[in-house]
Image (cartoon, helix red, strand yellow):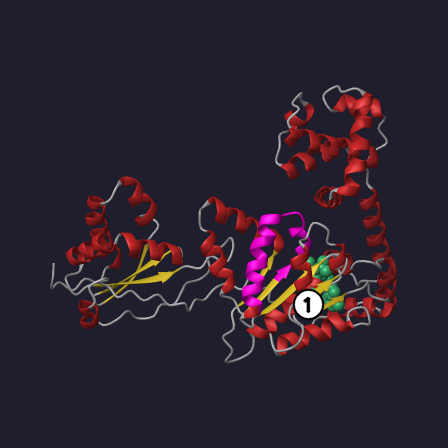
Amino acid sequence: METAVRNDVAQVWKDCLMVIRENVTEQSFKTWFEPIIPYKLINKRLIIQVPSQFFYEWLENNYVKILRKALDYAIGKDGQLEYTIIIDSGGQKAQQARQKPGAAPEEARNIPRNPFEIKVSKEVIFDSQLNKNYRFENFVEGSCNRLARAASVAVAQKPSVTAFNPLMIYGEVGLGKTHLVQAIGNYIEGQNGNNKLVLYVSSEKFTSQFINAIRDNSLQDFMNFYMMVDVLIIDDIQFLAGKEKTQETFFHIFNHLHQSGKQIVMTSDRPPRELSGMEDRLLSRFKWGLTTDIQTPDLETRMAIVQNKLATEKAEMDMEVVEYLANCVDSNVRELEGVVNSLIVDSALLQRKIDIELAKYRIKSLVEESQKAISIDKIIDVVTAHFNIKVSDIKGKTRLREVVLPRQIAMYLTKEFTELSLKTIGYHFGGRDHSTVIHAIQTINDLQNQDRELLLHIKDIKEKLKK
Ligand code: ADP
Ligand code: MG
């Protein structure tokens, strides 16, 4: 075994596992060795992939002797072990970490504590989660977004050097916040010779990663991961409102990054002062940098956005049509783009030019669509899915808080969106009395004024209902 040239990494790792299995408990084997992926075998250097820094540290602190034994058996006394770490930048496993070669064997032998002289490179490639289509070049400038755009360009050109740190951009939905902050990331990534780590994350994802980290006991990993980036772009931070623990963690990451001269970029759907449910110490940090808004674009900007969209899609329409569309859809760029997209599809399908008739027809059907009655069944479906509860529960007798509140919200929304009488609404919710429905509506009305989180839930549900 000692001298054989082994170049089959899978086989070598299998041999290692055989030795390991004999020396550790079943549980430890499952937890610490099954997740390891044999990565490469270069001469007598075995490179294994581990899921995190923490994982590697744990192996090193607890299983170094056994690993040595396994290597002796599978490769020989001069076998070396190296680790590479997979960085999971949320959801998908990112490509792969690069690793630095471990120390020479001579050296390794001289160090008693650790037979491998393990070196783990901090140098990792991870997915920045950026959408490459969001660039400054295709972001139309108008008076509605001039300052936000200028600040973004400045930050992109000199991250963490400008006074705009953090940069906070706020504004209503569909006005280009995400586009703009992603453009910052893409610009920085696209610069040659720059090895800044850029990371884009929605606050929703940040929160769920945080929750998972707590569940999996890997909070330190989570923090390390975020503290490693050079440019952190965090979208829709209003979502952190009311989430105390997540905010606290974000606060630490924020401070660490800021103190180490890293750039932070944030967006929100409302100005910081309206972010109730956000800790003051966090809000006051935002003031260190620049806070600026994006407003609804004026007619000319909307027309330019339509033209810009047409150019990217290599489609055409007369100026008259462009103006018509920009007039009809005036408050949300996303919707405006949606209309242009549907028209492009229509015109391809019907093999006709996008003219004013086609545009009128499309707008008319969109308006009808949005006015289409929302049914009680749909409300119940959306609400139960939103809160992850069962339809049978919402209609049933349970008084559990997790069900009562969604039930009340569903009744409240049924009243708002349908013409149904209180009695009928009660009937659909498990034969409840009309006074129960009145009580539900009042409760939600009252709560909405005090409870920001509830308000966000309702806002969210309404958006889902309109889809
Ligand atoms: P927000 O994050 O503010 O809700 P988005 O950035 O998602 O909005 O923008 C919605 C859509 O509108 C995106 O497809 C984006 O590319 C487009 N958009 C918004 N503003 C502009 C603009 N000024 N120029 C070009 N496209 C824009
Ligand atoms: Mg957005």
In this orientation, which residue lies closer to the viewer: 453 or 329? 453
Q: Residue 49, percent across and down? A: 34, 58
Residue 11 or residue 48, whichever sits in front: 48
Q: In this picture, is 375 found above or below 175? A: above
As displayed, is residue 85 above or below residue 462? below
* Residue 239 location (% of width, % of height): 66, 51
Q: Which residues are magenta?
A: 234-258
Query: Can the viewer see residue 327?
Result: yes
The residue drawn where x is 51% and y is 63% is 227
Residue 288 in the image: state x and y as whole percent.
67, 69
Q: Quadrant of ligand 2?
A: bottom right
Indicate if the residue with disc 1 has its beta carbon within 8 Å of ligand 1: yes
Q: Amino acid at mark 1?
A: Leu
| Residue corresponding to mark 1 | 180
Quadrant of res 234: bottom right
Residue under the image location 66 percent in, 63 percent down: 285
**Which quadrant, please, contains the N terminus?**
bottom left
Residue nearest the observer in this picture, 118 or 95? 118
Q: Estimate the x, y position of residue 86 in percent, counting from the top left.
A: 41, 59
Q: Quadrant of residue 339?
A: bottom right
Relative to residue 27, is residue 372 drawn left or right?
A: right
* Magenta highlight on residue 247: yes
| Image height of 7 relative to 419, above or below | below
